[in-house]
Amino acid sequence: MSQATLIDGKAIAAGLRSWIGEQIAQLTSKHGLKPGLAVVLVGEDPASQVYVRSKRKTAVKLGMESFEHTLPADVDQQTVLALVQQLNDDPKVHGILVQLPLPAHLDDKPVILAIDPLKDADGLHPENAGRLMAGETGMVSCTPLGCQLLLRRQIGDMTGKDAVVIGRSLLFGKPMAQLLLSENCTVTTAHSRTADLAGHCRRADILVAAVGRPEMVKADWVKPGAVVIDVGINRLPGDGDKDRLVGDVDFDAVSSVASAITPVPGGVGPMTIACLMFNALRAVRLQNGLEDVALPTSF
Ligand code: NAP
């Protein structure tokens, strides 16, 4: 049985980061501008701490200013909102990302609504979600943007392809479906109430899984030759005290059916951070009246 091509998100993200680094160097030398990215972390969730550290390291490496704000887990809603307002008002901050999920006593909706849509580095504000749906310029959520780039590089023209996205979250499933529509795919969004999920998946030329259930997508759910993007990050107990990361797709089995597949880790994850940097680059340009930049496919 033939093996699927591995879609190397790590290498593609490295290429994208170096393109972004060049763009920032030009922006700084030509216009004296340095993108500023602020990340807000509430609490001490170890996985979120790892993401935030990695975002800061990448931002600094690419020549951005990184502002990290850590609030205690028991912080009240007003304090979080006040911090977002302070970042909205800070001219050195061009992009704001509030690391989700927030602790259970906080409501993330008013926090997202409080972010200035121009500084909304993760494209979660309803204004940006609406702009994406309307086909207007706006900030687009980083993870689906990264998946779109992986698919463009793997497939090229996606016109007429049947695409199935499993998951309908604001953060991923909904914007991913919109991006696939913009690529002229015929899109099905599946979720926990979908009847005959496996049957829907079997019709997909492009199958994107963002569920949060370890290895849920089995080989007999996948159309031979499909391109499979695994967004899921699930931590399972591994050897010793180290967790083992697995996706939402049964990688080994699906690899013998699909034509191409992303690994976990090393697939979608690195693209998310690279696309956050891309959004910060766009944000500083748009806030300073400079021409917008499109996500490059070759670099
Ligand atoms: P989420 O908000 O929990 O959404 C999960 C979605 O999966 C929901 O729409 C849910 O349906 C659906 N679902 C749950 N159980 C299902 C089932 N048995 N069959 C079909 N659909 C089911 O999660 P998310 O934020 O979208 O993230 C999804 C996964 O992607 C997680 O593992 C997360 O860690 C990962 N992720 C990775 C990155 C990255 O950078 N690689 C970024 C973001 C997220 P309902 O709407 O009906 O409940």
Image (cartoon, rainbow, N blue to C red):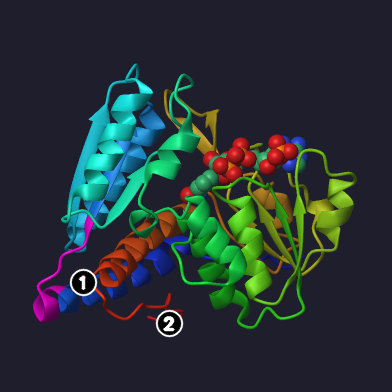
Q: Residue at x 66, y 36 (%)?
A: 213
Q: Is residue 145 left or right of residue 260?
A: left
Q: Nearer the viewer, residue 251 or 124?
A: 124
**Mark 1 crowdedness (10 Å alpha carbons): few <14, some 14-19, many ≥20:** many
**Neighbour class for label 2 at 10 Å: few (<14), some, many (≥20)?**
few
Quarter where residue 62 is shown? bottom left
Q: Start and end of the magenta stretch?
A: 28-36
Q: Quadrant of residue 20?
A: bottom left
Residue 299: % across, % down = 37, 80
Q: Which residue is rendered at x = 90% and y = 46% of the image?
A: 196
Which of the 4 image quadrants contains residue 16? Answer: bottom left
**Image coordinates for residue 31, horizontal then vertical, percent:** 13, 77
Nearer to the camera, 290 or 29: 290
Q: Which numbered tag is attached to residue 86?
A: none
Relative to 85, residue 231 above or below:
below
Q: Nearer the viewer, residue 242 or 197?
A: 197
Look at label 2 and name its amino acid. Ser
Label 1: which residue?
A: 24
- The mark that comes first in sequence, 2 or 1, is 1
Label 2 to label 1, Cα distance in Å?
17 Å
> Within the magenta stretch, is there residue 29?
yes
Specify the amino acid type for callout 1.
Ile
Q: Nearer the viewer, residue 247 or 5?
A: 247
180 sits to left or right of 86: right
Judged left or right of residue 121, residue 215 is right
| Residue in view at x 31 percent, y 41 percent | 52
Q: Secondary structure at mark 2?
A: loop
Q: Give the labeled residue for mark 2.
A: 298
